[in-house]
């Protein structure tokens, strides 16, 4: 067993003055390999190929890509356009690029852009700690929680969104058991969330994604706690495929459903979930495993990697600006209307 | 692409006069390897280790194990006891052993027991064809269906239960698209169902188990069609883990839910789902893939391989004796009370 370390020790996105180091999440937990990006194009590739994933981490990496491009004197409009195309669903990518674009328009030097990217990264970490405490406070002592995908240090600047709430809830004694869905096809839950939890010394139990309803019926979980890739103006939430399914079975069992994400994930310009672009990825992600074909040749696969949980199935959205219980357009407007 | 063959060409359980040949389902679709069993103990191992799986196929294999034991002059009480222990949830195993026990008690010779095992196998094939037509008749032309696990020729004497309905429905033009959940952790859907469908030339599309709700929301499926490992007297149905979850999300979307199983799967001695023993398997099935560890050391997993779908979430149970719509104890009693 890996020796437990401090609760937010992993920093998967590291700026090193003139280059960006990314912990290659495709290789975990078997190997801790780092990828070094010296230009914006290699950051684009790292985002598209899932070297770095998780909505907040994608945004942070893109901000550093802008810094690399500015230092190289590249055409910034073209770079911003190119980076936006890396992945369509997580709005944090667009948010970070828009923020950097604003600084470029204001005439910032590369050094000033570097400070802006640093601020984006530091603000995300601070937001995660704030959300951790806000979310944990909603959970009754002695609760079991189920999470999906990876929303921890690997997916953010550190600590995590949903996993930050779980870290805080465990530290405060509110959460006494943690279950994680393996999260097919990419196994972010199995590979990444369990890796983080074991490093932290938090006992955690993996389940097949399709065992969630049976787990809930057994009475072992009181909350589902997940992250988000985009939250629309009415509270509809795009997140990893399977989140919508969990929200339905949670409601069926009276299990509460919490979405945890920084304000940078809230997209008030998107009215509802129907307007969110859901990324379809290569069917090969389902047809093969670790490069080995598991399905007969001639078979096809349907591989949407996100889905939309409607606001009506969400009990609470937690952000660093506050919590929105029973979210709808009006309640979202009250908190985020002046963003 | 494998050349399409006849719609029920695979015979995964083959009696050869003095030995039993089993298509090793752990190796599909990569390799068509056969395991030869010359005594009852090796059949027990084949059932426990998933060389042969699927409730009806397990029952048939166990009947042949009894024949092997009788020919070897073994202690039949001990053998029957031993075989019952191979897997706990599928009642077809107990049903086939009880049927063979009855013939032993009646003083049958090994040759007569051989005829009984042959009858069990042939009756299962006939039941599947009957159920195929009964089930398909309930499906509106132009429908899409989603299935789970493998319920085809590999899981039965041939043709299949839920997959038999799908084969009949496709042949009759009622079913125009077929989706299969990959069925973690053992990937019976990905490895076995797609293999059967591609062999039959039936276009089929694999999905992650957790994509089912998103698929239903897209309007591409009108029915979920699954098999069963045990159906209780009130219609509650034990089947592969994930079936219960599918029943909840199907009801949420107005998608119909059909259970297809021979009468040998109906257990009128079990009052309801709470009385069904749910098999827990080795956590390693979730922690590793193809012998390669995918989860960090120190992590645990919870691996129930079946769950129970309550009768109230089932629209229809199809057996060779007839269909039970909106199943409950009274309607089940009407059809199976005189079993």
Image (tube, coloured by chain):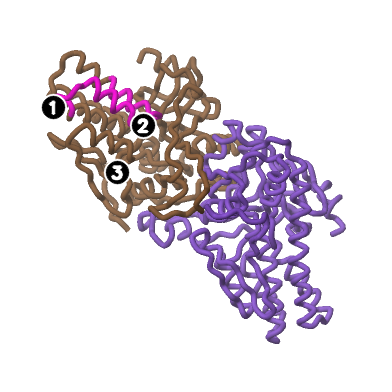
Chain colours: A purple, B brown
**Residue B82 covered by magenta stretch:** yes
Crowding near the residue tagged with mark 2, few <14, some 14–19, many ≥20 C-alpha atoms within 10 Å: many
How far across and down, in percent of the image, does residue B283 sit? 46, 43
Chain identity of mark 2: B
Tag 1 residue: B71
Left or right of residue A237: residue B222: left
The one nearer the camera, A201 or A215, is: A201
Which residue is located at x 65 percent, y 58 percent? Answer: A153
Tag 2 residue: B87
Chain identity of mark 3: B
Residue A65, numbered circle: none
Crowding near the residue tagged with mark 1, few <14, some 14–19, many ≥20 C-alpha atoms within 10 Å: some
Q: Secondary structure at mark 3?
A: loop
Left or right of residue B73: residue B54: right
Tag 3 residue: B7
Residue range in magenta is: B69-98
Q: Secondary structure at mark 2?
A: loop
The one nearer the camera, A159 or A241, is: A159
Chain identity of mark 1: B
Q: Secondary structure at mark 1?
A: helix
Marks 2 and 1, Cα distance to the nearest angstrom? 24 Å
Q: Is residue B173 shown above or below B294?
A: above
Q: Residue furthest front?
A: A3
Q: Mark 3 or 2, which is nearer the eye?
A: 2
Q: Mark 3 or 1, which is nearer the eye?
A: 1
* Magenta segment, prevailing SS (helix, strand or loop): helix
Look at the image and tell me in which quarter the N terminus of chain B lies: bottom left
The disc, 3 or 1, on the residue closer to the chain's N-terminal end is 3
Which residue is located at x 29 percent, y 52 percent? Answer: B4
């Amino acid at each position: 067993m890996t020796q437990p370390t401090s609760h937010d020790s992993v920093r998967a996105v590291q700026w090193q003055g003139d280059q960006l180091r990314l912990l290659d999440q495709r290789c975990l937990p078997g190997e801790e390999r780092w990828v070094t990006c010296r230009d914006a194009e290699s950051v684009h590739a790292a985002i598209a190929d899932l070297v770095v994933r998780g909505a907040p981490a994608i945004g942070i990496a893109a901000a550093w890509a802008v810094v690399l491009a500015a230092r190289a004197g590249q055409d910034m409009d073209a770079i911003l356009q190119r980076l936006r195309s890396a992945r369509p669903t997580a709005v944090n990518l667009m948010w970070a690029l828009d923020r950097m674009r604003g600084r470029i328009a204001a005439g910032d030097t590369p050094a000033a852009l570097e400070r802006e990217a640093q601020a984006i990264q530091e603000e995300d970490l601070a937001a995660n700690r704030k959300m951790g405490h806000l979310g944990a406070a909603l959970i009754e002592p002695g609760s079991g929680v189920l999470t999906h995908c990876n929303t921890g240090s690997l997916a953010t600047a550190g600590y995590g969104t949903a996993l930050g709430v779980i870290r805080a809830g465990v530290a405060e004694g509110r959460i006494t058991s943690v279950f994680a869905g393996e999260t097919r096809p990419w196994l972010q839950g199995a590979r990444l969330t369990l890796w983080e939890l074991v490093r932290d010394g938090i006992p955690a139990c993996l389940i097949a994604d399709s065992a969630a309803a049976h787990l809930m019926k057994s009475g072992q979980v009181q909350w589902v706690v997940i992250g988000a890739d985009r939250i629309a103006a009415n509270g509809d939430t795009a997140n990893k495929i399977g989140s919508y399914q969990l929200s339905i079975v949670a409601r069926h069992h009276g299990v509460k459903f919490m979405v945890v994400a920084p304000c940078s994930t809230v997209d008030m310009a998107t009215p509802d979930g129907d307007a969110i672009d859901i990324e379809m990825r290569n069917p090969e992600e389902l047809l093969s495993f670790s490069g080995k074909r598991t399905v007969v040749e001639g078979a096809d696969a349907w591989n949407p990697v996100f889905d939309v949980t409607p606001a009506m199935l969400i009990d609470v959205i937690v952000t660093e600006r506050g919590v929105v219980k029973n979210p709808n357009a009006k309640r979202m407007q009250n908190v985020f209307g002046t963003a």
